């Protein structure tokens, strides 16, 4: 099975909406990538304030006569074991990006990879015996010696999924699920021809 490099003419023939303007869509790609990375943040970092740390609340010593600075308790931030002033609190880092911006970013990223010659097409992709060794050989035959390969199709057989699940350098994904970050992350992108209409629908204005 031989792979064919997808060029701009073939992409247009497959009804993919391309963004060939060098400046258009760059900000959209940035916004979408930042939002995706921010949405993965748990925001669970937490510190205790002086009111939350464990302590008696009792004055450590009398107000006057000791020669020391007056203290109202052991929980303020300047005490060892006291609360933290202005420390991190649980928060939501998520960002929202509208649908048009996501579509533009996806089209821009896909166009850039096509222009770079990193998108390949194949009539079909299947590993009938379900073995990782066979899967790796198939990927090497299609994309060559590269670090990361993304295989995009509308559907994969259970045997193909089983063969790919133990291969860290390659990933299977459907045309409905592939996103802008994955398009930019992987060294080579192998697209099964049956997934081209799905990608065309996702890039349509």
Image: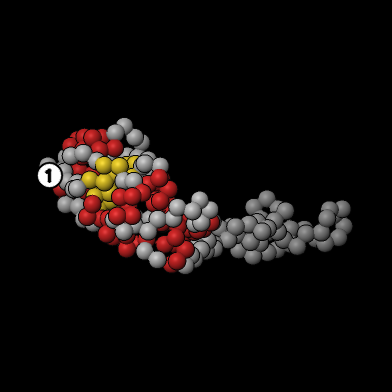
Q: Is residue 57 left or right of residue 67?
A: left
Return the residue nearer the eye: 164 or 47: 164
User: What quarter of the picture does the N terminus occupy?
Assistant: top left
Q: Residue at x 45, y 66 (%)?
A: 100
Counting from the top left corner in percent of width and height, residue 103 is at: 42, 62
Q: To which quarter of the image does residue 170 belong? A: top left
Residue at 52% of width from left, 61% of height from top? 93
Q: Residue at x 33, y 50 (%)?
A: 9
Where residue 37 sits in the image (x, y, percent)? 47, 54
Query: Can residue 121 be seen by looking at this rendering?
Result: yes
Residue furthest top as drawn:
145
**Against 101, is 22 above or below?**
above
Few, some or many C-alpha atoms within 10 Å of disc 1 (few <14, some 14-19, many ≥20)? Answer: few
Q: Residue at x 40, y 45 (%)?
A: 115
Q: Quadrant of the C terminus?
A: bottom left
Q: Please, what secondary structure does the residue beneath circle 1 have?
A: loop
x then y, percent, for residue 82: 66, 55
Quarter of the figure with residue 198 = bottom left
Residue pointed to by mark 1: 128
Q: Number of marks in the image?
A: 1
Query: Image check: 169 left or right of 181?
Result: left
Q: Position of residue 119 (x, y in %)?
A: 33, 45
Which residue is more in the foreground, 11 or 163?
11
Which residue is more in the foreground, 154 or 113?
113
Q: Is residue 55 visible?
A: no
């Amino acid at each position: 099975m031989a792979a064919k490099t997808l060029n701009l003419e073939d992409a247009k023939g497959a009804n993919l909406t391309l963004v060939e303007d060098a400046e258009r869509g760059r900000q959209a790609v940035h916004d979408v990538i930042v939002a995706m990375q921010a949405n993965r943040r748990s925001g669970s970092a937490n510190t205790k304030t002086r009111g939350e740390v464990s302590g008696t609340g009792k004055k450590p010593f009398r107000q006057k006569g000791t020669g020391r600075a007056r203290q109202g308790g052991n929980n303020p931030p300047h005490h060892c074991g006291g609360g933290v002033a202005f420390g991190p609190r649980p928060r939501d880092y998520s960002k929202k990006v509208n649908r048009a911006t996501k579509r533009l970013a996806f089209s821009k990223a896909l166009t850039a990879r096509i222009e770079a010659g990193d998108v390949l097409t194949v009539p079909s992709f299947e590993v009938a015996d379900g073995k990782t060794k066979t899967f790796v050989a198939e990927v090497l035959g299609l994309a060559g010696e590269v670090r990361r390969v993304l295989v995009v199709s509308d559907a994969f057989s259970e045997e193909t999924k089983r063969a790919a699940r133990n291969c860290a350098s390659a990933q299977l994904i459907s045309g409905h699920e592939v996103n802008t970050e994955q398009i930019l992350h992987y060294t080579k992108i192998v697209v099964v021809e049956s997934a081209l209409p799905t990608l065309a629908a996702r890039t349509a204005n």
